[in-house]
Image (cartoon, rainbow, N blue to C red):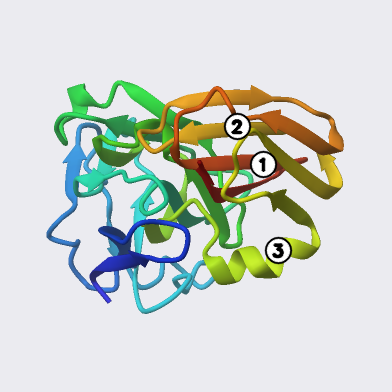
Amino acid sequence: MKHVYRLALMLGLWPLSISAQYSQSFDSATLPSDWTIINGGDTGTWKTWTSYDSTFSASHSGSHFLGLEYGSDAHSDYAISPAIVVTAGVSDKLTFWGRNRGAGLAEIVDLKISTTTPTAAAFTTTLASAVKPPVTWQQYTYDLTPYVGQTIYIAFYSTTTDIWFIGIDDFVVSSNTLAVSEAAADKKSISIYPNPVGDILTIESKNKISEINIYDMTGRAQKLIAPNSGTTKITMSDLSAGNYVVKIKEGSTEKSYKIIKK
Protein backbone atom coordinates (compact mmCIF):
# COMPACT_ATOMS: atom_id res chain seq x y z
CA MET A 1 0.00 0.00 0.00
CA LYS A 2 1.63 3.24 -1.08
CA HIS A 3 -0.71 5.61 0.67
CA VAL A 4 -4.36 5.89 1.59
CA TYR A 5 -6.54 8.96 1.97
CA ARG A 6 -9.49 7.72 4.00
CA LEU A 7 -12.91 9.34 4.21
CA ALA A 8 -13.84 9.40 7.86
CA LEU A 9 -17.57 9.48 8.47
CA MET A 10 -18.33 11.03 11.84
CA LEU A 11 -21.71 9.86 13.12
CA GLY A 12 -23.54 9.76 16.43
CA LEU A 13 -23.42 12.93 18.52
CA TRP A 14 -21.91 15.03 15.74
CA PRO A 15 -23.43 16.70 12.72
CA LEU A 16 -22.44 14.71 9.64
CA SER A 17 -18.95 15.60 8.43
CA ILE A 18 -16.49 14.04 5.99
CA SER A 19 -12.77 14.72 6.05
CA ALA A 20 -9.60 13.01 4.82
CA GLN A 21 -7.25 11.00 6.99
CA TYR A 22 -3.86 9.82 5.75
CA SER A 23 -1.65 6.76 6.04
CA GLN A 24 1.65 5.77 4.48
CA SER A 25 3.41 2.43 4.88
CA PHE A 26 6.23 3.08 2.36
CA ASP A 27 5.60 -0.26 0.62
CA SER A 28 7.44 0.46 -2.60
CA ALA A 29 11.00 0.33 -3.91
CA THR A 30 10.72 4.06 -4.54
CA LEU A 31 9.74 6.85 -2.19
CA PRO A 32 6.08 7.94 -2.20
CA SER A 33 5.48 10.65 -4.78
CA ASP A 34 3.70 12.85 -2.23
CA TRP A 35 6.70 12.95 0.15
CA THR A 36 9.55 15.47 -0.07
CA ILE A 37 13.15 14.51 0.73
CA ILE A 38 15.78 17.15 1.50
CA ASN A 39 19.37 15.92 1.71
CA GLY A 40 21.32 18.77 3.23
CA GLY A 41 24.22 16.88 4.79
CA ASP A 42 26.29 13.89 3.71
CA THR A 43 25.42 11.73 0.72
CA GLY A 44 23.23 9.37 2.76
CA THR A 45 19.55 10.20 2.55
CA TRP A 46 16.07 8.95 3.43
CA LYS A 47 14.85 6.13 1.15
CA THR A 48 12.79 2.95 1.31
CA TRP A 49 14.32 -0.36 2.36
CA THR A 50 13.22 -4.00 2.54
CA SER A 51 15.91 -4.73 5.14
CA TYR A 52 19.19 -3.30 6.40
CA ASP A 53 21.05 -6.42 7.53
CA SER A 54 20.33 -9.77 9.19
CA THR A 55 19.53 -8.04 12.49
CA PHE A 56 17.25 -5.38 10.98
CA SER A 57 15.64 -7.50 8.31
CA ALA A 58 11.94 -6.64 8.24
CA SER A 59 9.55 -3.72 8.11
CA HIS A 60 6.91 -3.24 10.78
CA SER A 61 4.28 -4.16 8.17
CA GLY A 62 4.28 -4.82 4.45
CA SER A 63 7.42 -5.12 2.34
CA HIS A 64 9.28 -1.81 2.81
CA PHE A 65 9.95 0.92 5.35
CA LEU A 66 11.53 4.38 5.38
CA GLY A 67 15.15 4.36 6.54
CA LEU A 68 18.28 6.46 6.95
CA GLU A 69 21.84 5.08 7.12
CA TYR A 70 24.78 6.62 8.94
CA GLY A 71 27.38 8.78 7.23
CA SER A 72 30.85 9.94 8.23
CA ASP A 73 29.66 13.52 7.84
CA ALA A 74 26.67 15.02 9.63
CA HIS A 75 23.16 14.53 8.29
CA SER A 76 20.86 17.45 7.71
CA ASP A 77 18.12 15.35 6.17
CA TYR A 78 14.37 15.81 6.06
CA ALA A 79 11.67 13.28 5.13
CA ILE A 80 8.55 15.41 4.74
CA SER A 81 4.91 14.33 4.60
CA PRO A 82 2.39 15.78 2.16
CA ALA A 83 0.22 18.68 3.28
CA ILE A 84 -2.25 17.56 5.96
CA VAL A 85 -5.34 19.51 6.96
CA VAL A 86 -5.73 19.04 10.72
CA THR A 87 -9.40 18.65 11.62
CA ALA A 88 -10.68 18.14 15.17
CA GLY A 89 -11.86 14.60 15.79
CA VAL A 90 -10.81 13.50 12.29
CA SER A 91 -7.12 14.11 11.58
CA ASP A 92 -5.65 15.44 14.83
CA LYS A 93 -3.40 12.56 15.90
CA LEU A 94 -0.09 11.31 14.46
CA THR A 95 1.18 7.77 14.97
CA PHE A 96 4.15 5.98 13.45
CA TRP A 97 6.49 3.09 14.24
CA GLY A 98 10.26 3.42 14.64
CA ARG A 99 13.26 1.25 15.45
CA ASN A 100 17.04 1.45 15.54
CA ARG A 101 19.66 -0.99 14.27
CA GLY A 102 21.69 -0.84 17.49
CA ALA A 103 21.24 0.53 20.99
CA GLY A 104 24.85 1.64 21.43
CA LEU A 105 24.85 3.75 18.27
CA ALA A 106 21.19 4.67 18.15
CA GLU A 107 20.06 7.27 15.64
CA ILE A 108 17.80 10.06 16.84
CA VAL A 109 15.37 12.24 14.90
CA ASP A 110 13.39 15.38 15.58
CA LEU A 111 9.78 15.72 14.46
CA LYS A 112 9.31 19.14 12.91
CA ILE A 113 6.21 21.05 11.81
CA SER A 114 5.78 23.57 8.99
CA THR A 115 2.54 25.49 8.52
CA THR A 116 3.64 27.03 5.21
CA THR A 117 5.82 25.04 2.79
CA PRO A 118 7.81 21.76 2.69
CA THR A 119 11.16 23.57 2.75
CA ALA A 120 13.93 23.33 5.34
CA ALA A 121 13.64 26.96 6.45
CA ALA A 122 9.91 26.56 7.12
CA PHE A 123 10.28 23.86 9.80
CA THR A 124 10.57 26.22 12.75
CA THR A 125 8.38 24.26 15.18
CA THR A 126 9.48 21.06 16.94
CA LEU A 127 6.74 18.54 17.70
CA ALA A 128 9.19 16.17 19.44
CA SER A 129 12.96 16.32 19.88
CA ALA A 130 15.59 13.58 20.11
CA VAL A 131 13.25 10.68 19.40
CA LYS A 132 15.39 7.56 19.84
CA PRO A 133 13.56 4.30 19.09
CA PRO A 134 14.67 1.00 20.65
CA VAL A 135 16.01 -1.96 18.65
CA THR A 136 12.52 -3.38 18.16
CA TRP A 137 9.62 -1.65 16.45
CA GLN A 138 7.87 0.77 18.79
CA GLN A 139 4.82 2.94 18.16
CA TYR A 140 4.87 6.68 18.82
CA THR A 141 1.78 8.89 19.19
CA TYR A 142 1.59 12.69 19.05
CA ASP A 143 -1.25 15.13 19.54
CA LEU A 144 -1.93 17.48 16.61
CA THR A 145 -4.79 19.31 18.34
CA PRO A 146 -2.84 22.61 18.56
CA TYR A 147 -2.85 22.69 14.74
CA VAL A 148 -6.59 22.19 14.23
CA GLY A 149 -7.77 24.36 11.35
CA GLN A 150 -4.29 24.57 9.83
CA THR A 151 -2.55 22.82 6.96
CA ILE A 152 0.74 21.33 8.12
CA TYR A 153 3.73 19.36 6.87
CA ILE A 154 5.40 16.87 9.24
CA ALA A 155 9.11 16.10 8.88
CA PHE A 156 11.51 13.53 10.28
CA TYR A 157 14.75 15.49 10.65
CA SER A 158 18.17 13.95 11.31
CA THR A 159 21.45 15.72 12.12
CA THR A 160 23.46 12.76 13.47
CA THR A 161 27.04 11.92 12.51
CA ASP A 162 28.49 8.41 12.05
CA ILE A 163 25.87 6.60 14.12
CA TRP A 164 24.08 3.64 12.47
CA PHE A 165 20.59 3.14 11.00
CA ILE A 166 16.99 4.13 11.81
CA GLY A 167 13.71 2.90 10.34
CA ILE A 168 10.25 4.51 10.21
CA ASP A 169 7.04 2.73 9.18
CA ASP A 170 3.24 3.00 9.18
CA PHE A 171 2.86 6.78 9.37
CA VAL A 172 -0.81 7.55 10.13
CA VAL A 173 -2.76 10.75 10.74
CA SER A 174 -6.16 9.89 12.21
CA SER A 175 -8.76 10.78 14.83
CA ASN A 176 -7.68 11.76 18.32
CA THR A 177 -11.14 10.98 19.74
CA LEU A 178 -12.76 7.69 20.57
CA ALA A 179 -15.32 6.37 18.13
CA VAL A 180 -18.77 5.49 19.47
CA SER A 181 -17.91 1.79 19.76
CA GLU A 182 -14.59 2.57 21.47
CA ALA A 183 -16.28 4.92 23.90
CA ALA A 184 -18.82 2.23 24.77
CA ALA A 185 -16.03 -0.24 25.46
CA ASP A 186 -14.29 2.34 27.62
CA LYS A 187 -17.34 3.03 29.80
CA LYS A 188 -16.14 0.60 32.45
CA SER A 189 -13.19 2.84 33.29
CA ILE A 190 -14.46 6.38 32.54
CA SER A 191 -17.95 7.89 32.70
CA ILE A 192 -18.81 11.34 31.31
CA TYR A 193 -22.32 12.68 31.87
CA PRO A 194 -24.67 14.21 31.00
CA ASN A 195 -24.03 14.41 27.28
CA PRO A 196 -25.36 16.75 25.93
CA VAL A 197 -24.46 18.86 28.96
CA GLY A 198 -26.01 22.07 30.22
CA ASP A 199 -24.38 23.48 33.36
CA ILE A 200 -22.26 20.79 35.06
CA LEU A 201 -20.25 18.01 33.42
CA THR A 202 -19.34 15.08 35.67
CA ILE A 203 -16.34 12.87 34.93
CA GLU A 204 -15.78 9.68 36.92
CA SER A 205 -12.89 7.26 36.59
CA LYS A 206 -11.69 4.18 38.42
CA ASN A 207 -8.21 5.70 38.19
CA LYS A 208 -6.83 9.02 39.38
CA ILE A 209 -7.29 11.74 36.75
CA SER A 210 -4.29 14.07 36.63
CA GLU A 211 -5.49 16.53 33.99
CA ILE A 212 -8.58 17.43 31.95
CA ASN A 213 -8.48 19.73 28.92
CA ILE A 214 -11.53 20.94 26.99
CA TYR A 215 -11.10 22.23 23.43
CA ASP A 216 -13.52 23.82 21.01
CA MET A 217 -13.65 22.68 17.39
CA THR A 218 -11.01 25.18 16.27
CA GLY A 219 -8.52 23.59 18.69
CA ARG A 220 -8.58 26.47 21.17
CA ALA A 221 -8.25 25.42 24.81
CA GLN A 222 -11.32 26.42 26.84
CA LYS A 223 -10.66 24.81 30.22
CA LEU A 224 -7.78 23.15 32.06
CA ILE A 225 -8.51 21.24 35.26
CA ALA A 226 -6.09 19.23 37.41
CA PRO A 227 -8.39 17.26 39.76
CA ASN A 228 -5.87 14.65 40.96
CA SER A 229 -8.81 12.42 41.86
CA GLY A 230 -11.18 9.93 40.27
CA THR A 231 -14.23 12.21 40.15
CA THR A 232 -14.61 15.83 39.17
CA LYS A 233 -17.41 18.23 38.26
CA ILE A 234 -16.77 20.94 35.66
CA THR A 235 -18.82 24.09 35.21
CA MET A 236 -19.84 24.34 31.55
CA SER A 237 -22.40 27.15 31.75
CA ASP A 238 -19.81 29.72 30.68
CA LEU A 239 -19.17 27.94 27.36
CA SER A 240 -21.13 28.59 24.19
CA ALA A 241 -23.40 25.91 22.78
CA GLY A 242 -21.62 23.58 20.38
CA ASN A 243 -19.29 20.61 20.05
CA TYR A 244 -16.21 20.14 22.24
CA VAL A 245 -13.40 17.63 22.76
CA VAL A 246 -12.58 16.55 26.32
CA LYS A 247 -9.08 15.15 26.82
CA ILE A 248 -8.53 13.15 30.01
CA LYS A 249 -5.07 12.22 31.26
CA GLU A 250 -4.54 9.33 33.67
CA GLY A 251 -0.84 8.81 34.36
CA SER A 252 0.83 8.33 30.97
CA THR A 253 -2.49 7.56 29.24
CA GLU A 254 -4.54 10.23 27.49
CA LYS A 255 -7.98 9.71 25.95
CA SER A 256 -10.29 12.07 24.09
CA TYR A 257 -14.09 12.19 24.05
CA LYS A 258 -16.69 14.14 22.13
CA ILE A 259 -19.38 16.11 23.98
CA ILE A 260 -22.12 18.59 23.11
CA LYS A 261 -22.77 21.74 25.13
CA LYS A 262 -26.46 22.73 25.02
Categorize mark 2 by other alpha carbons within 10 Å: few (<14), some (14-19), many (20+).
some
Residue 207 image point, x, y percent: 86, 47
Q: Is residue 62 above or below residue 219?
A: below
Q: Earlier in the sequence, mark 2 or mark 3?
A: 3
Q: Is residue 48 above or below residue 94?
A: below
Give, as a three-letter code, the residue at label 3: Asp
Q: Is residue 76 left or right of residue 31?
A: right
Q: Is residue 78 above or below residue 100?
A: above
Residue 73 image point, x, y percent: 32, 32
Instruction: Give the residue number, with chain letter if any, for mark 2.
Output: 213
Q: Residue at x 51, y 53 (%)?
A: 177
Give the secondary structure at mark 1.
Answer: strand
Quarter holding the N terminus? Answer: bottom left
- Residue 183 - label: none
Front residue of this view, candidates 89 and 193? 193
Residue 237 image point, x, y percent: 58, 27
Q: Quadrant of residue 149?
A: top left
Viewer can see residue 158: no
Instruction: Give the residue number, with chain letter if any, for mark 1.
Output: 248
Give the secondary structure at mark 2.
Answer: strand
- Residue 186 - label: 3
Q: Quadrant of residue 219?
A: top left
Give, as a three-letter code, the residue at label 1: Ile
